[in-house]
Image: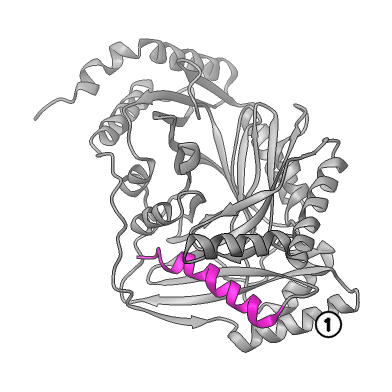
């Protein structure tokens, strides 16, 4: 039997880590308490998605988040602390859970590694409470992972979060870490080509074309009567496969097809996963600088450069699309101002994806240290880009028109670290995967001038983005 190099040198190389853990344990002994330790180490380059595929267990919660454009990917596997809640105060309860947990975490990191230290991974549902009793995800879940592996600028960082008690065997903690590094080092850096299989799927619209179009017609009547200015109506597509869906291959396909989107996946620890390729960032905070996206108004991509440019031009000059877009900008700037931030609206541009293009205006702000990221998430969710305006009226109408549970669709998913940095996306262009069944979601913004046929076609176009990737 060969002894791995990790086992031979690990205890010598990480003498300072051993001393750190011993000191933490001594503190636990003296104060009759337990503490969390967050250990960050740089390791050889590996693909976090491969690590997720290899290490994630069906009965454990996990999270995956990738942004190819920024050269970032992060996988969170299993949990050492979790909070699952619902209700209108879920964001403030989540904030308190993170703050209280951080008071009890001691960090070990060699230097200023990217993505080092404890990160809390969160997902929230669209509504504060799910109305469907058996919907598989809670209205809010926040967890501190046992294992976190990330890539940033071609550097790979492993974080182990663990509990230390007065009676903990320190050698066992180090041995567990050492074994995990061995396992991860044995994985190959994997970036295969697209895996396309003959689609042996049966497909069924949840609400059907006529229901969706008549909902749009009814909503337009309410807009004409000034009951609301905009509403986002979604459709869902149920897909049944002859085999179980392969999460790893589907996510890998998504990142190949949509390199300029956020690829995400979260598991509830009961076998269901919510995955997607979202073009929409809710907020990103780095070193107290916030950026958020106003993303609304869309047109298809063209088959030729000339057609593509013509579609883009029509989109930029279309009054209906510009109106829909301005509603989102106004909402975001107002909501940020309400909590004392000073939003700066950056020049508008186009966000061009593989099969669709959107009007896109980034908005930035400086975040004071006393404003927690989840306070901002609570202020912004849901934006008019995924709900409508006025927001509360639109949300009540969505419940009436849509005959399925939105759940995590169009809701915030992301992470928060111990320094107040965060990244959250809006869970659009997404699917709920459960064995051999998947439910795909997509929506369209309805404003004055919307056409039921065109809105239905737009939703089908968005559904295709995900359908193409599923394996």
Q: In which quadrant of the rendered image does the C terminus lie?
A: bottom left
> Is residue 440 visible from the viewing direction of this image?
no
The one nearer the camera, 186 or 3, is 186
Q: Which region is colored magenta?
A: 451-471
Query: Residue lying furthest right in this view?
Result: 226
Whether 432 is among the magenta residues is: no
Q: Is residue 396 left or right of residue 118?
A: right
Residue 455 magenta-highlighted = yes
Horizontal side of residue 420 vs 2, given as left or right:
right
- Kindly identify the residue that appears in the image at 82 percent across and 36 percent down: 341
Above/below status of 283 relative to 16: below
Q: Residue 414: percent from the left, percent from the top?
A: 58, 45
Quadrant in which the N terminus appears? top left
Indicate whether 50 appears above or below 403.
above
Name which residue lies at 48% across and 51% down: 263
Q: Residues within 10 Å of mark 1 (few under 14, many from 20)?
A: some
Q: Residue at x 60, y 26 (%)?
A: 104
Q: Which residue is mark 1?
A: 221
Residue 153 image offset from top left, x and y in percent: 44, 29
């Amino acid at each position: 039997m060969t002894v791995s190099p990790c086992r031979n040198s690990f205890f010598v190389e990480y003498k300072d880590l051993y001393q750190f853990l011993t000191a933490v344990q001594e503190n636990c002994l003296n104060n009759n308490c337990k503490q969390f330790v967050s250990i960050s180490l740089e390791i050889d380059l590996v693909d976090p998605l491969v690590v997720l595929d290899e290490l994630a267990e069906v009965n454990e919660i996990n999270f995956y988040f990738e942004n190819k454009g920024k050269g970032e990917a992060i996988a969170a596997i299993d949990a050492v602390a979790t909070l699952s809640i619902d209700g209108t105060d879920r964001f403030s309860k989540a904030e308190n859970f993170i703050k209280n947990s951080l008071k009890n975490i001691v960090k070990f990191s060699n230097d200023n590694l990217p993505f080092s230290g404890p990160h809390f991974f969160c997902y929230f549902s669209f509504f504060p409470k799910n109305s469907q009793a058996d919907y598989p995800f809670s209205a809010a879940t926040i967890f501190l992972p046992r294992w976190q592996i990330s890539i940033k600028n071609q550097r790979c960082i492993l974080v182990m979060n663990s509990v230390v008690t007065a009676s903990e065997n320190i050698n066992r903690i180090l041995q567990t870490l050492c074994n995990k590094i061995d396992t991860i080092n044995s994985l190959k850096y994997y970036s295969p080509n697209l895996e396309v299989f003959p689609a042996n799927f049966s497909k069924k619209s949840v609400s059907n074309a006529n229901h969706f179009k008549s909902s749009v017609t009814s909503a337009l009547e309410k807009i004409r009567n000034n009951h609301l200015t905009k509403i986002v109506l979604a459709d869902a597509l149920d897909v049944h496969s002859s085999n179980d869906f392969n999460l790893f291959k589907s996510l890998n396909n998504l990142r190949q097809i949509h390199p300029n989107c956020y690829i995400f996946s979260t598991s509830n620890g009961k076998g269901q996963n919510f995955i997607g390729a979202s073009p929409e960032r809710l907020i990103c905070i780095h070193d107290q600088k916030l950026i958020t996206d106003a993303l609304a108004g869309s047109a298809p991509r063209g088959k030729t450069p000339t057609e593509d440019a013509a579609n883009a031009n029509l989109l930029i000059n279309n009054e209906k699309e510009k109106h829909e877009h301005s509603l989102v900008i106004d909402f975001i700037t107002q909501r940020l101002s309400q909590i004392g931030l000073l939003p700066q609206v950056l020049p508008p541009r186009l966000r061009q994806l593989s099969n669709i293009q959107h009007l896109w205006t980034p908005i930035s702000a400086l975040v004071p240290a006393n404003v927690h990221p989840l306070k901002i998430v609570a202020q912004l969710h849901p934006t008019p880009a995924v709900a409508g305006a006025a927001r509360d009226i639109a949300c009540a109408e969505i419940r009436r028109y849509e005959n399925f549970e939105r759940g995590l669709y169009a809701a915030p998913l992301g992470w928060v670290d111990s320094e107040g940095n965060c990244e959250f996306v809006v869970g659009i262009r997404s699917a709920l995967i459960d064995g051999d069944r998947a439910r795909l979601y997509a929506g369209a913004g309805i404003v004055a001038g919307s056409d039921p046929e065109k809105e239905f076609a737009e939703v089908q176009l968005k559904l295709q983005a995900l359908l193409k990737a599923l394996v």
